[in-house]
């Protein structure tokens, strides 16, 4: 018995609709689906606010939970702690956490990269994993709550000059600043973009009530960052694009907190909010094609040498690193 043509057409229509629904549920990058749909078509300050409303809601962690969370969010390929402040540490989770320290390499602790004194130790910021990282205790202490910035390291340099502290050399600010290694400047830039987006409604209060936040913030919900800080962080983000490390961490934090950092999911998204694409509409499901921004795996990584276990190798000439399946492979290259 032959199947009527109308029945065939109906079955094809149903199958096509099913495929469309499946595809529609997985349109966003990194399996984010329709997570960012509410921000579609927006740009500039409006896009920032829309993203804030999306990413603010999450599962809140306790401060104690962070020790366990770091095992999922900040493990190197060899299973050791991925420290972004020191280039010499080789910490084991749990064994080397907290405790007293006298020098670099003693213990790791929980670093608020966006210092807690800038928002008064208040929740939910206090335990937001997107700006909390495991870092060397001694270097963390030297960083204190100084803003991020570029300097000559006249006040302090970590082992090998990996990170440093000194008078700001970036135009617009002359105070003391902490400079992370080039390898992670983009990571911290996207961390700050997340913070001033997620908590934009709180920014005026932070600026008013916590003086130490003022070199970094501008006291407004938009732009949110002071002029010199925004200019510098935009430059850091462009020079050190999204890495596989950041993408993996974003996914790991999502599994724990159930929110995401859009500046990692959409490389170059900051240009739609503060940069040269402010007049263009953001497309959550067609971003790569619409903007021409390259995929994270193809982006240039920071100049660095790592051994096979993921550790930075001391005393080696700097080479250009790229990630392959979660590890950083080194190839010759110059800045």
Image (cartoon, rainbow, N blue to C red):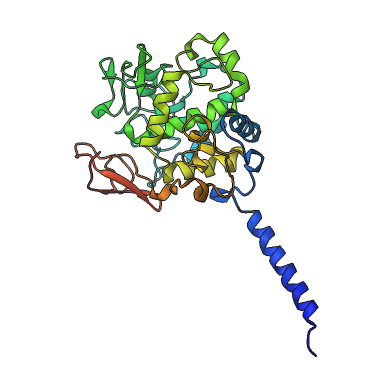
As displayed, is residue 49 above or below residue 219? below
The residue at the far bottom in this view is 1
Q: Residue at x 53, y 31 (%)?
A: 273
> The N terminus is located in which quarter?
bottom right
Residue 237 occupies quadrant: top left
Find residue 203 and report its horizontal and vertical position in percent.
Answer: 58, 18
> The C terminus is located in which quarter?
top left
Q: Residue at x 63, y 58 (%)?
A: 23
As displayed, is residue 53 above or below residue 32? above
Residue 333 occupies quadrant: top left
| Left or right placement of residue 203 versus residue 237 in this view | right
Find residue 116 and report its horizontal and vertical position in percent.
Answer: 51, 19
| Left or right placement of residue 12 versus residue 168 in this view | right
Nearest to the observer: residue 101 or residue 325: 325
**Residue 120 visible in image:** no
Find residue 54 and report its horizontal and vertical position in percent.
Answer: 64, 35
Q: Residue at x 56, y 22 (%)?
A: 222
Q: Residue at x 28, y 14 (%)?
A: 155
**Count of numbered labels shown in the rendering:** 0
Nearest to the observer: residue 68 or residue 14: 14
**Residue 256 visible in image:** yes
| Left or right placement of residue 75 versus residue 183 in this view | right
Find residue 89 and report its horizontal and vertical position in percent.
Answer: 33, 34
As displayed, is residue 141 above or below residue 10? above
């Amino acid at each position: 018995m032959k199947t009527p043509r109308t029945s065939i057409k109906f079955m094809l229509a149903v199958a096509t609709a099913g495929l469309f629904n499946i595809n529609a549920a997985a349109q966003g990058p990194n399996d984010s689906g329709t997570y960012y749909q509410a921000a579609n078509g927006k740009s500039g300050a409006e896009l920032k606010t829309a993203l804030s409303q999306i990413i603010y809601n999450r599962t809140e962690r306790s401060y104690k939970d962070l020790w366990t969370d770091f095992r999922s969010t900040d493990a190197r390929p060899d299973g050791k702690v991925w420290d972004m402040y020191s280039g010499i540490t080789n910490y084991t989770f749990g064994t080397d956490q907290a405790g007293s320290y006298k020098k670099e390499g003693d213990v790791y602790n929980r670093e608020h990269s966006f210092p807690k004194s800038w928002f008064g130790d208040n929740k939910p910021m206090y335990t937001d994993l997107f700006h909390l990282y495991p870092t060397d205790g001694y270097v963390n202490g030297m960083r204190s709550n100084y803003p991020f910035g570029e300097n000559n390291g006249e006040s302090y340099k970590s082992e090998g000059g990996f990170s440093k502290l000194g008078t700001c050399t970036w135009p617009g600010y002359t105070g003391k600043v902490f400079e992370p290694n080039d390898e992670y400047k983009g990571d911290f830039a996207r961390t700050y973009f997340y913070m001033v987006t997620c908590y934009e409604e709180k920014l005026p209060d932070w600026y008013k009530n916590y003086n130490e936040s003022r070199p970094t913030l501008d006291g407004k919900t938009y732009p949110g960052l002071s002029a010199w800080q925004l200019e510098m962080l935009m430059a850091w983000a462009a020079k050190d694009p999204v890495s596989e490390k950041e993408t993996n961490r974003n996914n790991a934090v999502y599994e724990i907190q159930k929110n995401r950092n859009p500046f990692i999911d959409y490389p170059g998204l900051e240009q739609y909010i503060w940069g040269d694409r402010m007049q263009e509409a953001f497309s959550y499901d067609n971003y790569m094609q619409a903007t021409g921004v390259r995929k994270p795996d193809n982006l240039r990584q920071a100049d660095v040498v790592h051994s096979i276990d993921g550790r930075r190798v001391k005393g080696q000439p700097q080479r250009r690193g790229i990630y392959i399946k979660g590890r950083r492979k080194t190839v010759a290259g110059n800045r």
